[in-house]
Image (cartoon, rainbow, N blue to C red):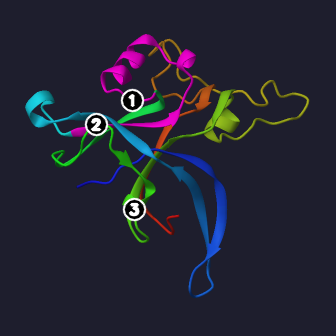
Amino acid sequence: MKKAIIGKKVGMTQIFDESGKVIPVTVIEAGPCVVAQVKSNETDGYNAVQLGFGDVKESKVNKPVKGHFAKSKLALKKHLREFRMDSVEDVKVGDEFKADVFVKGDKVDIQGTSKGKGFQGVIKRHGQSRGPMGHGSMYHRRPGSMGSTSTPGRVFKGKRLPGHMGANTITIQNLEVVAVD
């Protein structure tokens, strides 16, 4: 059976391995996650479990989510995520998944949201070089040329321009679990 859990990044630190080498590690507060729904091949066409993590006040949750948790007779949770599983016969609604499902040396895929930077220019967003800063220059931190003239008469898709930066879903694969408390 696949292992899955929802957690919250606490911060980073470093630990020493047996040979004395420093390993940078991310500390994650993982679980306990409660099973809010079990989806099976017979009812939904695929096998999955829906996990809830983190307590939340009732006033912060909308009516459909309240109904979803009321149906399963569980306390409200802040985060609700679904994970595909190979089989779900031994999982029931209300079961708890804790960090002890992982052991030292396991390889895991981590998914999270990067820091949002807001609206940024091309220098910060795409790493472009700035223009000359001298007196005669008319551009310093601007994007530069938009392309050709009347043919094609438009800016091509994918042109590196200023815009919203960060707040993206990032996935890192095959990270090693260094320790589990």
Mark number, residue 102 = 3
Identify the element where label 1 is drawn: loop
User: How far apart are the alpha carbons under marks 1 and 3?
Assistant: 25 Å
- Residue 64 in the magenta stretch? The answer is yes
Q: Given contact means CB atoms under 8 Å apart, are the residues at marks 2 and 3 in contact?
A: no
Of the numbered discs 2 and 3, the one sitting upstream in the chain is: 2
Span of residues in magenta: 48-75
Residue lying at 62% horizontally and 38% vertically, measured from the top left: 115
Of the residues tagged 1 and 3, which is closer to the observer?
1
Of the numbered discs 1 and 3, the one sitting upstream in the chain is: 1
Where 12 falls versus 22 (above or below)?
above
Residue type highlighted by circle 2: Val
Residue type highlighted by circle 1: Leu
Identify the residue position indicated by label 1 in the image: 74
Q: In which quarter of the image is residue 163?
A: top right
Mark number, residue 93 = 2
Percent position of residue 67, x then y? 36, 16
